[in-house]
């Protein structure tokens, strides 16, 4: 059982503002983590382009974004160290207790399952709607926008990808920062994230929408913008976690909730 605080309806905008402050306070480290994430995305794109499948890069980069919270552990740690009044350092995340790292690894594996599911479903959809089509980076957009099969692929793929992204967001929105900050297990952290979504879906869906828009904008310029948008979203996610202030409920609080 987990308890959370109620947040303002416009809280996501405040989280972004606070996240920008965190990023500006430790720009070198934050942007360094962003650069690593960006290089991974560029490597995926170049690899697919090298084998003539550059048009599929957005699909796999989108899937890669599903596991982004696992890559953001170091960024959460920057915000945590700043909140404690200390100066962040590059490898502060290694100073986390072993138990927390174990739970973070467990939650990361769960996100990896979402990524693998997306990759498998994408493979199935391309086989169904676009078998034998040219997926070079110059031909994929005309195919998706002008060919009936391409339009069907675009619509179905977007719906399925959106559903997977929403599922990953629901379990990871505040669970990763919670595991960085508290000695709880992964299932308690997931419960906190799911409870935040159930308690204030309007706020959380607004936050999910903002994350999607910012990520797309960061990806637009050959993914280079992700070096900035990735740490910004991570810092803001830490502020979202602090705003909801999840904590394991005591036995008395749990019994009171059951009676209610």
Image: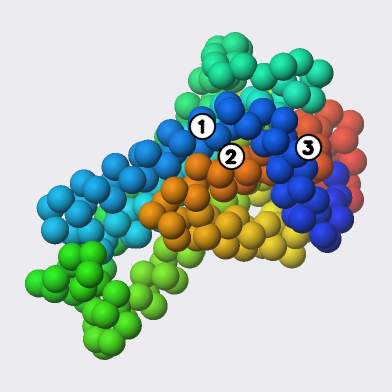
Where residue 52 appears, x then y in whole percent?
14, 58
Mark 2 or mark 3: which comes first in sequence?
A: 2
The residue indicated by pointer 2 is 231
Considering the numbered disc 1 on the image, is that residue within a helix, a strand or a loop?
helix
Mark 3 is surrounded, within 10 Å at the Cα level, by few (under 14), some (14 to 19) or many (20 or more) other residues, namely: some
For residue 102, say whether it is visible: yes
Report the Cα–Cα distance between label 2 and label 3. Answer: 17 Å
Residue 20, quarter of picture: top right
Mark 2 or mark 1: which comes first in sequence?
A: 1
Say whether marks 2 and 1 touch (CB < 8 Å): yes
Report the Cα–Cα distance between label 2 and label 1. Answer: 7 Å
The residue indicated by pointer 1 is 33
Say whether marks 3 and 1 touch (CB < 8 Å): no
Residue 197 sits above or below residue 44 on the image: below
At x 18% / y 67%, what residue is drawn?
135
Mark 1 is surrounded, within 10 Å at the Cα level, by few (under 14), some (14 to 19) or many (20 or more) other residues, namely: many
Is 108 left, or right, of 240 in this rendering?
left
Report the Cα–Cα distance between label 3 and label 1. Answer: 21 Å
Q: In the image shown, does 120 or 144 lie closer to the viewer?
A: 144
Where residue 158 appears, x then y in whole percent?
42, 70
Q: Which mark is residue 242?
A: 3
Q: In the image shown, does 4 or 13 lie closer to the viewer?
A: 13
Residue 77, quarter of picture: top right
Is 135 left, or right, of 72 in this rendering?
left
Considering the numbered disc 3 on the image, is that residue within a helix, a strand or a loop?
helix
Q: In the image shown, does 223 or 129 lie closer to the viewer?
A: 223
Mark 2 is surrounded, within 10 Å at the Cα level, by few (under 14), some (14 to 19) or many (20 or more) other residues, namely: many
Where residue 171 appears, x then y in whole percent?
58, 46
Considering the numbered disc 2 on the image, is that residue within a helix, a strand or a loop?
helix
Is 131 left, or right, of 147 in this rendering?
left
At x 51% / y 54%, what residue is drawn?
218
């Amino acid at each position: 059982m987990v308890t959370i605080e109620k947040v303002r309806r416009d809280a996501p905008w405040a989280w972004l503002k606070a996240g920008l402050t965190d990023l500006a306070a430790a720009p070198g480290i934050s942007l360094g983590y962003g650069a690593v994430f960006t290089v991974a995305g560029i490597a995926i794109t170049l690899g697919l382009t090298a084998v003539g499948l550059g048009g599929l890069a957005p699909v796999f980069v989108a899937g890669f974004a599903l596991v982004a919270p696992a890559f953001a552990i170091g960024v959460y740690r920057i915000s945590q160290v700043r909140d404690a009044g200390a100066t962040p350092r590059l490898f502060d995340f290694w100073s986390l207790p072993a138990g927390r790292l174990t739970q973070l690894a467990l939650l990361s594996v769960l996100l990896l399952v979402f990524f693998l599911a997306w990759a498998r479903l994408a493979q199935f959809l391309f086989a169904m709607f676009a078998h034998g089509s040219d997926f070079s980076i110059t031909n994929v957009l005309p195919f998706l926008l002008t060919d009936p099969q391409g339009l069907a692929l675009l619509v179905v793929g977007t719906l399925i990808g959106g559903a997977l992204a929403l599922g990953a967001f629901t379990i990871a929105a505040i669970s990763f920062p919670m595991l960085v900050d508290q000695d709880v297990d992964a299932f308690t952290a997931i419960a906190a994230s799911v409870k935040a979504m159930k308690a204030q879906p309007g706020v959380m869906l607004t936050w999910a929408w903002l994350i999607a828009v910012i990520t797309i904008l960061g990806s637009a310029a050959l993914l280079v913008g992700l070096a900035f948008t990735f740490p910004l979203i991570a810092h803001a996610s830490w502020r979202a976690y602090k705003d909801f202030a999840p904590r394991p409920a005591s036995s008395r609080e749990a019994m009171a909730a059951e009676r209610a």
